[in-house]
């Protein structure tokens, strides 16, 4: 039930891009082009399912998996002032292209971002990716509905695809209160995304980047980050709230009634960002997440789709780190 780390940390790194803009103003004037390399890693302890209503599931084992990803991103910012007023004089459009690589997948991304005013950003983009399997590590599989086993499928004829649109609101109290210690920052975003695997039936369940029980459909993600920025090596400390799910559980077909297809996964994650010189930053994140709680004990894979959901189970999902180096 994992989500690949790039989905989480790519959005977390927005914090650095948004709230470090003042520090990078000189660099922005020199060149509209930027190139950065982001490397992510996450460690998952084991937390077994507990039956019942809403509750917390403690850690029951040392290891339940790791995630790793590296992404090379190039961006070009084009100034598009909408007038001489300070509110719109810094309007700009940014074009981004990225290449994401994990041990079991390769994905290309393109996006465009429009920032008409300092506190509002509209963005849209899409990506296409290819997954593969390395032994027990499964990057691309389809579930056999008869056996509930995940079976490898052709990488070339079944690419992963997604298209998304996001609106982001950002605010820094430092814009109103001068001083190095006056930066309470807020970032809130809402994303609509459509994704799936090409060549599969609409109600086929698949596994992509070690994340099972996925189906093609329209989903959403709400994210809010509240933090305090400081003129120290520990540049930002805060907390992230995120909720994500399908708009309509009918995407799961016959499994929807029991599995609760539109169940929203919610996470609350303290985070700390370390600024290392002018070109490097490191983010550490502690992810407390939630998942479906089932009526009966989960003994095997098929039980997850055939056991009634009765509540929400909170657990410590992972510890994640993300390092970014900006080349220019």
Image (cartoon, grey):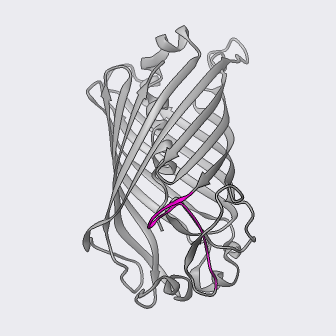
Q: Nearer the viewer, residue 263 or 136?
A: 136
Residue at 56%, 12% in the rendered image:
31
> Which segment did they paint magenta?
132-145
Q: Is residue 188 above or below residue 251?
A: above
107 part of magenta stretch: no
Q: Position of residue 167 (x, y in %)?
A: 64, 42
Q: Going by the image, does 135 lie left or right of 318? A: right
Which residue reaches farthest top?
Answer: 30
Q: Is residue 218 above or below residue 82?
A: below
Q: Is residue 68 above or below residue 215?
A: above
Observer able to see residue 228: yes
Which residue reaches farthest bottom?
Answer: 296
Residue at 32%, 28% in the rendered image:
275
Q: Nearer the viewer, residue 104 or 95?
A: 104
Q: Position of residue 252 (x, y in %)?
A: 67, 76
Q: Is residue 276 above or below residue 265?
A: above
Q: Nearer the viewer, residue 40 or 78?
A: 40
Q: Going by the image, does 214 lie left or right of 224? A: right
- Among the 4 quarters of the image, the one containing residue 86: top right
Observer able to see residue 286: no
């Amino acid at each position: 039930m994992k989500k690949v780390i790039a989905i989480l940390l790519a959005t977390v790194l927005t914090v650095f891009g948004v709230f470090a803009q003042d520090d990078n103003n000189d660099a922005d004037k020199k060149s509209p082009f930027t190139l950065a390399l982001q490397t992510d890693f996450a460690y998952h302890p084991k937390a077994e399912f507990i039956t019942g209503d809403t509750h917390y599931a403690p850690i029951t084992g040392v290891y339940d998996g790791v995630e790793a990803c590296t992404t090379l991103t190039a961006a070009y910012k084009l100034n598009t002032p909408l007038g001489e007023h300070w509110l719109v004089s810094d309007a700009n459009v940014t074009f981004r292209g990225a290449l994401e690589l994990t041990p079991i997948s390769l994905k290309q991304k393109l996006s465009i971002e429009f920032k008409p005013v300092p506190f509002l950003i509209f963005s849209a983009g899409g990506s296409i990716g290819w997954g593969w399997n390395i032994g027990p590590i499964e990057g691309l599989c389809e579930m056999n509905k008869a056996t509930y086993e995940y079976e490898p499928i052709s990488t070339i004829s079944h690419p992963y695809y997604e298209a998304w649109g996001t609106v982001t609101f950002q605010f820094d109290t430092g814009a109103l209160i001068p001083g190095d210690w006056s930066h309470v920052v807020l970032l809130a975003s809402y994303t609509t995304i459509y994704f799936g695997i090409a060549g599969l039936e609409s109600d086929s369940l698949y596994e992509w980047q070690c994340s099972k029980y996925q189906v093609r459909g329209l989903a959403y993600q709400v994210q809010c980050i509240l933090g305090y920025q400081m003129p120290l090596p520990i540049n930002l400390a805060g907390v992230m709230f995120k909720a994500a799910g399908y708009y309509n559980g009918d995407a799961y077909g016959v499994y929807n009634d029991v599995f609760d297809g539109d169940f929203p996964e919610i996470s609350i994650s303290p985070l700390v960002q370390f600024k290392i010189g002018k070109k490097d930053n490191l983010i550490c994140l502690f992810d407390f997440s939630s998942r479906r709680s089932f009526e009966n004990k989960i003994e095997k894979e098929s039980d997850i789709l055939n056991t009634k959901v009765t509540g929400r189970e909170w657990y410590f999902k992972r510890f994640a780190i993300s390092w970014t180096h900006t080349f220019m």
